[in-house]
Image (cartoon, rainbow, N blue to C red):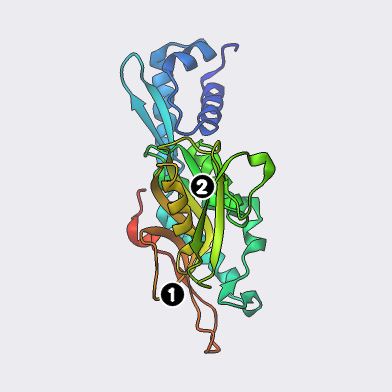
Amino acid sequence: MKKLRRSARIADMTQYLLERPRLLLPLTLFSERYGSAKSSISEDLQIIKDVFVMEGVGDLETVPGAAGGVKFLPDVHMAQVEEWMQELMQGLRTEQRMLPGGYLYLSDYLHQPQIVNKIGKIFGSLFAAQDVDCVMTVETKGIPLAYATAQVLNVPIVIARRDTKVMEGSVVSINYVSGSSKRIQTMSLSRRALPESSKVVIVDDFMKAGGTIRGMMDLLQEFKAEVVGACVFMESDTTTHRIVDEVYSLIRFNHDEQVQEPINLTLGNIFDKHSDKG
């Protein structure tokens, strides 16, 4: 690449880092890419780091030594996230969204790329500094959120299916109890989809009692995988018998079907567990 002015170099370097989150990049890569001394590259990276931290984009982690380099770790300012979630909840508080069984219609929101990408960045930032090999969800509504989270973490996505497909090859299947309906359901995952002993983040759109997430956890045990964490966009706050713990949620949904009342949405437990880093 031809030699660039510093302003153009910083702009290109910023884009390069944003497209490769959590990937360790040696300084020699940038030095050769821009035909600049490592000392100049280090100064550029410090400028980028300062802006990333100030704007809540993330952080640059420097790894010293011959095998070292720089790594972009996505992050968010929780105060900004809270403000955005308040706006989002305002649009969700309409009676027309109520569905039978105590569910809320979310598909129109979770099919908007701008919303999904923001949620993915929030989820991904929780685990950006941890060792994660993949993101897992179950078909179908959680897929967009899982993809967005996987993009932030720069890892593959695996999808547990409700039924088996011929093109999946050999599969591992388990039966699990739906936490809300108490029905026995089946969940399957191709043996080729996930290497043994992988470290996995689970993502889903909605959680009542947690039966689906518990099913994914049990399925992952068959692969000797480790669950690093689990996230949902919305959790029901009316369920008394929760069968999973330590699941991050962005929104809590509290609704009593026996009482006619406005839809009660509050901030999820992610705001209880993580203070603003900015």
Q: Residue at x 50, y 72 (%)?
A: 182
Q: Could one spot residue 155 in this view of the protein?
A: yes
Image height of 260 relative to 43, above or below: below
Which one is earlier in the sequence, the residue at label 2 or at label 1?
A: 2
Q: Nearer the viewer, residue 121 or 181?
A: 181
Q: Amino acid at mark 1?
A: Thr
Q: Secondary structure at mark 1?
A: loop
Q: Residues within 10 Å of mark 2 (few under 14, many from 20)?
A: many
Q: Amino acid at mark 2?
A: Met
Residue 47, given in percent of the width and then of the height, sits at: 42, 29
Q: Nearer the viewer, residue 183 or 206?
A: 183
Residue found at the far left of this picture? 65
**Badge number at residue 273:** none
Query: Disc 2 designates what residue?
Result: 136
Image height of 137 relative to 1, above or below: below
Image height of 196 relative to 254, above or below: above
Q: Nearer the viewer, residue 20 or 53?
A: 20
Quadrant of the image occupied by residue 132:
top left
Residue 75, given in percent of the width and then of the height, sits at: 43, 44
Q: Residues within 10 Å of mark 1 (few under 14, many from 20)?
A: some
Position of the N terminus by quadrant:
top right
Residue 63, given in percent of the width and then of the height, sits at: 33, 24
Q: Residue at x 44, y 42 (%)?
A: 223
Q: Secondary structure at mark 2?
A: strand
**Badge number at residue 239:** 1
Q: Could one spot residue 75 in this view of the protein?
A: no
